[in-house]
């Protein structure tokens, strides 16, 4: 009904730019935002339309929960006229909608979302410190990582807030405690190592900063891919009315969403390419070939006197292939080579914007995350650890707590005497049973207790035959490859876990 009134020019709505479309109403679930000009005629038309709708539908608006916002240019007299028709209170500056502040000044952008910190801390009521590392991993992946997704989808949260949220998760992972006053606990591995994908030797926890970026990239992709939607039209007319998104001016005043998109534009630049079919896109401001961003620098000087083509299809022959002699008249050799490399689809379908990193050409948050993660510089884990952990993560017979324990063992993240002593010299580096240096090899294979355990276990293994100073992954691979079928990976790992448990019982509960 509102759209009918708008078509009849009875209501005008509000446009965010001089040439952009008017926004008449925004509707989400049972919430409705109506926009209009602050004058008697438009307000009367709006209330008449609204009354007709209420009469037909039998619904009643809750005026007590409704509020009104005027632009600063609206005079007091105009405000009084509109408020005489819509008897609602003024918008409060602190109003939020589904958690998002309606008014979000750049100076208060960080503070506006700090309630997320309280939400994270609130999870301490779950008695989190009773959880094993496997339980903590599940809680981090299912709860901590999902809470901020909604708020991260349309703007980049401040680095300070992300650091605070990450520190809460990191503390919870290492210490299992979310109390505010205690220290962070000992971090045996960097958080970046932990956030690696599982098949690269990490635990597959999503890094919040990269997750935030991938969500905003996905939102940007949605409006780039659907240029006729209302939001895409509003953004185009407000921020790049005379060019494409790819060449838009980054110095205009901008919303939190738009400034976030512009910060991530380099990733979009390098990840998007047009699949050419009709050739309707511009040569000069669209990603049509590898060197499109600097295509102006590749112009032949003689071409400046020619009539330059605008659409890609103007560089094709009648058979829809690249017209190399023609292209050579406009561009230098490198540009000619780059343009002619692009494959042209023979079918008559619209040109299609593609995401380079998926086979379907569609951008998903996970592919955007992988692309951002690809650029993070991390020291690779050894192929031995990577293949062993891949085998373990995929094995459904191994309980989750044993899997996470093995990750800690192979990542040198168990609090052995040596690992603790390098970080806190006051803690002894020696074994509580025999007094030798307590590294992973000693605890699990060479301490007399471990030797006896392996010997009387169903494996009947004499560990003194194993090399004395190898890494745990080497020992495990040795057992799996050298001995007979008794050495299934789950049985080996369960025995290692039992040796670790017995070591802790001896150390902390004085059991022998
Ligand atoms: Zn020992």
Image (cartoon, helix red, strand yellow):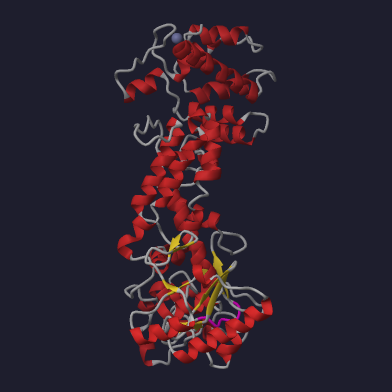
Left/right of residue 349 with respect to residue 108 in the rendered view? right
Task: From the image, give the main secondary structure of the stretch colored magenta.
Answer: loop
Magenta highlight on residue 280: yes
Return the residue nearer the eye: 380 or 368.
368
Q: Position of residue 464 (x, y in %)?
A: 52, 9
* The N terminus sits in image quarter: bottom right
Q: Quadrant of residue 84?
A: bottom left
Quarter of the displayed picture in which ligand 1 can be seen: top left
Above or below, comparing residue 278 to residue 124 in the picture: below
Return the residue nearer the eye: 109 or 76.
76
At x 63%, y 84%, the residue is 52
Please provide the residue range marked out in magenta.
Answer: 277-281
Q: Name the outermost residue toward the right.
A: 485
Decide if residue 322 is in sight here. yes
Q: Position of residue 473 (x, y in %)?
A: 52, 26
Decide if residue 240 is in sight here. no
Above or below, comparing residue 380 to residue 486 in the picture: below
């Amino acid at each position: 009904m509102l759209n009918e009134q708008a078509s009849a020019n009875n209501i005008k709505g509000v446009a965010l730019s001089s040439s952009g479309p008017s926004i008449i109403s925004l509707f989400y679930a049972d919430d409705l935002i109506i926009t209009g000009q602050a004058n008697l005629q438009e307000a009367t038309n709006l209330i008449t339309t609204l009354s007709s709708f209420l009469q037909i539908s039998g619904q009643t608006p809750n005026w007590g929960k409704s509020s009104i916002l005027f632009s600063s240019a609206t005079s007091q007299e105009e405000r009084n006229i509109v408020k005489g028709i819509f008897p609602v209170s003024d918008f409060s500056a602190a109003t939020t909608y589904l958690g998002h502040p309606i008014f979000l000044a750049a100076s208060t952008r960080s503070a506006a979302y700090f309630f997320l910190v309280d939400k994270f801390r609130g999870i301490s009521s779950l008695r989190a410190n009773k959880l094993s590392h496997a339980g903590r991993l599940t809680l981090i992946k299912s709860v901590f990582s999902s809470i901020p997704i909604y708020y991260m989808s349309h703007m980049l949260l401040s680095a300070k807030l992300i650091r605070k949220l990450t520190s809460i998760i990191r503390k919870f992972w290492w210490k299992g405690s979310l109390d505010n006053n205690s220290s962070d606990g000992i971090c045996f591995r960097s958080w970046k190592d932990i956030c690696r994908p599982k098949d690269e030797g990490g635990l597959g926890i999503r890094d919040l900063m990269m997750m935030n970026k991938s969500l905003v990239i996905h939102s940007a992709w949605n409006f780039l891919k659907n240029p006729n939607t209302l939001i895409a039209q509003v953004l185009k007319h407000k921020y790049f009315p005379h060019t494409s998104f790819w060449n838009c001016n980054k110095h205009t005043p901008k919303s939190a969403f738009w400034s976030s998109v512009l910060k991530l534009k380099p990733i979009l630049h390098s990840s998007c390419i047009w699949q050419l079919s009709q050739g309707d896109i511009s040569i000069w401001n669209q990603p049509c070939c590898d060197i499109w961003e600097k295509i102006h620098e590749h112009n032949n000087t003689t071409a400046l006197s020619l009539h330059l083509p605008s659409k890609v299809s103007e560089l094709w022959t009648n058979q829809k292939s690249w017209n190399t002699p023609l292209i050579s008249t406009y561009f230098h050799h490198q540009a000619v080579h780059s343009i002619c490399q692009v494959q042209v689809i023979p079918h008559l379908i619209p040109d299609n914007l593609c995401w380079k990193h998926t086979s379907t050409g569609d951008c998903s948050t996970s592919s955007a995350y992988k692309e951002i993660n690809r650029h993070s510089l991390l020291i690779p884990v050894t192929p031995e650890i990577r293949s062993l952990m891949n085998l373990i993560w995929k094995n459904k017979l191994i309980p989750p707590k044993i899997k996470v324990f093995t990750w800690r063992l192979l990542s040198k993240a168990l609090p052995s005497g040596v690992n603790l002593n390098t970080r806190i010299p006051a803690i002894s580096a020696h074994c509580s049973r025999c007094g030798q240096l307590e590294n992973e090899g000693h605890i699990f294979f060479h301490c007399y207790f471990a030797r006896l355990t392996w010997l009387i276990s169903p494996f009947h293994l004499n560990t003194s035959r194993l090399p004395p100073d190898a890494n745990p992954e080497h020992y495990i691979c040795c057992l799996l490859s050298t001995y007979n079928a008794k050495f299934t990976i789950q049985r080996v790992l369960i025995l290692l876990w039992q040796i670790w448990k017995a070591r802790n019982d001896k150390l902390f509960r004085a059991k022998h």
